[in-house]
Image (spheres, grey):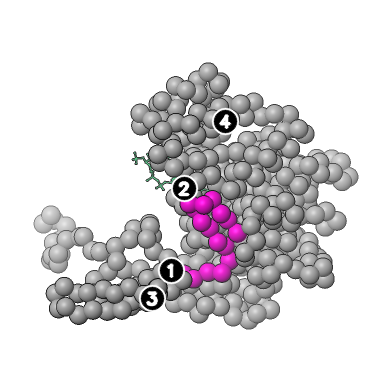
Amino acid sequence: MAESITIIDNRTGDSTEIPLTNGGVSAAEFSKLLPGVWFYDPAFMSTAACESAITYLDGDAGVLRYRGYPIEQLAEHSTYLEVAYLLIHGELPTPDQYAEWSHEITYHTFIHENVRKRFLEGFHYDAHPMGMLVSAVAALSTFYSDAKDIFDADARYKQIIRLIAKMPTLAAAAHRFSVGMPFVYPDNSLDFASNFLSMMWKVAEPRFEADPVLARALDVLFILHADHEQNCSTTAMRVVGSSHADPYSSTAAAAAALYGPRHGGANEAVIRMLTEIGSIENVPAFIEGVKAGNGRLQGFGHRVYKSYDPRATIIKHTADQVFEVTGKNPLLDIALKLEEIALSDEYFISRKLYPNVDFYSGLIYQAMGFPMEMFPVLFAIPRTSGWLAHWSEMLDQDSKIARPRQLYIGTDERDYVAIDGR
Ligand code: ACO
């Protein structure tokens, strides 16, 4: 079968051969037929904005792979740091490469004292930790003058290491400040997840020992959230990065996109919904309400997945392990009942609505003691490696600055009227 489509212009009878590249139609070729006419595609529903070799997602089949590796295998056998290496470099590390990578990340976890003292501590006492994180990441660009050398391979790599390493430190610092607790310095003898838990929860003990089951569960959640191809925040990263802004500023833009409840805040909405439902007996009435148009079943449905989100399957299993340590989250039974009823209901079946990654992740975070304000922050920590992989890929593709066109719907030209004449 020819890898092209033929388009006939009925006005002139001219035909044009448009090549299909990787299953996509080249807009540059197509638009030659329609000079001056723009493709109208708000929210990019039908637009592939780039080529990417990082993450493969088949929403109909429920498949997610990083650099070709199925998410199920990575979640079972790998670590977040190894996955971060995979996303950035394209290949799994050898033992030596992994040792060096882990060392680099571990020894860049400290933040400049002025980031904490002058900057983070300047926030209002009840500042939202995600707002603090977004601002603090942007502020880091002012501490590293080499951040602007984005086409210097060594300088670029150094910023990637710094960003992946410092996100947990900034995240925990934002939480500690927002609850009035003193800052905890990184403990470089701990692994990535345990170190973050130490910075979150350490009080007066000389050394914080994270429960290994909880540390592993968090690491698995970090793996599952590390990348998801061209989602809203990654698109923000690529768009801002296309102007050749430094990686801290671009990452701050991506984190800001993640802040919104339609993206990184959905698991908080799930907890609020489950709390509002209150008990299993209220589930059928709640489902009927959703079907009647009273709100949505939070944590259900996805723009791309039209079958079970593979990450939700893994998270459900992780939740069982976490609850064995923490005790069951009392909202779990309500969630299970909701899922059971929804998956056998024609409304949800016909619309291909299944649980997504957010349906169970909030239950785990809550059982582990994280306040809801920290949920998007917990998302931003691992997604940083995905953002940076896309940013670096975009720079290597020598891509143009992202600059879409618009369909102007405002008034025609008119003359200025002085204020006393209006
Ligand atoms: N509950 C009830 N009905 C739903 C839901 C839901 N969660 N999601 C979609 N529908 C229905 C819509 O009402 C619509 O029905 P209709 O055809 O009768 O009008 C149909 O399914 C299609 O819905 P759209 O809004 O067109 O689907 P879209 O792809 O634009 O939305 C989204 C995807 C935003 C994720 C949506 O499913 C939703 O709002 N889910 C709840 C919020 C949520 O869980 N977000 C997290 C997404 S995962 C992530 O970002 C990490």
In the image shown, does 373 or 63 lie closer to the viewer? 63
Q: CA distance from mark 4 to mark 3?
A: 48 Å
Identify which amino acid the numbered label 2 is placed on.
Lys
User: Dot 2 corresponds to which residue?
Assistant: 306
User: Residue at 76% of width from left, 46% of height from top?
Assistant: 215
Residue 325, percent from left and from top: 77, 34
Ligand 1 located in image quadrant: top left
> Mark 2 or mark 3, which has the lower sequence index?
3
Identify which amino acid the numbered label 4 is placed on.
Ala
Residue 55 within the magenta-colored segment of the rendering? yes
User: Residue at 41% of width from left, 69% of height from top?
Assistant: 24
Q: CA distance from mark 2 to mark 3?
A: 29 Å
**In front: mark 2 or mark 4?**
2
The residues colored magenta run 49-65
Circle 4 — which element?
A: helix
State left or right for residue 67 relative to residue 345. Answer: right
Specify few, some or many for label 3: CA neighbours under 10 Å numbering under 14, 14-19, or 20 or more: few
> Mark 4 or mark 1, which has the lower sequence index?
1
Identify which amino acid the numbered label 1 is placed on.
Gly
Q: Is residue 331 above or below residue 375?
A: above
**In front: mark 4 or mark 3?**
3
User: Dot 1 corresponds to which residue?
Assistant: 23
Residue sitting farthest toward the top = 281
Question: Residue 2: which numbered mark, if any?
Answer: 3
Identify which amino acid the numbered label 3 is placed on.
Ala
Residue sitting farthest toward the right = 206
Q: CA distance from mark 2 to mark 1?
A: 20 Å
> Mark 4 or mark 3, which has the lower sequence index?
3
Specify few, some or many for label 1: CA neighbours under 10 Å numbering under 14, 14-19, or 20 or more: few
Q: Quadrant of residue 337?
A: top right
User: Dot 4 corresponds to which residue?
Assistant: 335
In the image shown, does 384 or 371 lie closer to the viewer? 384
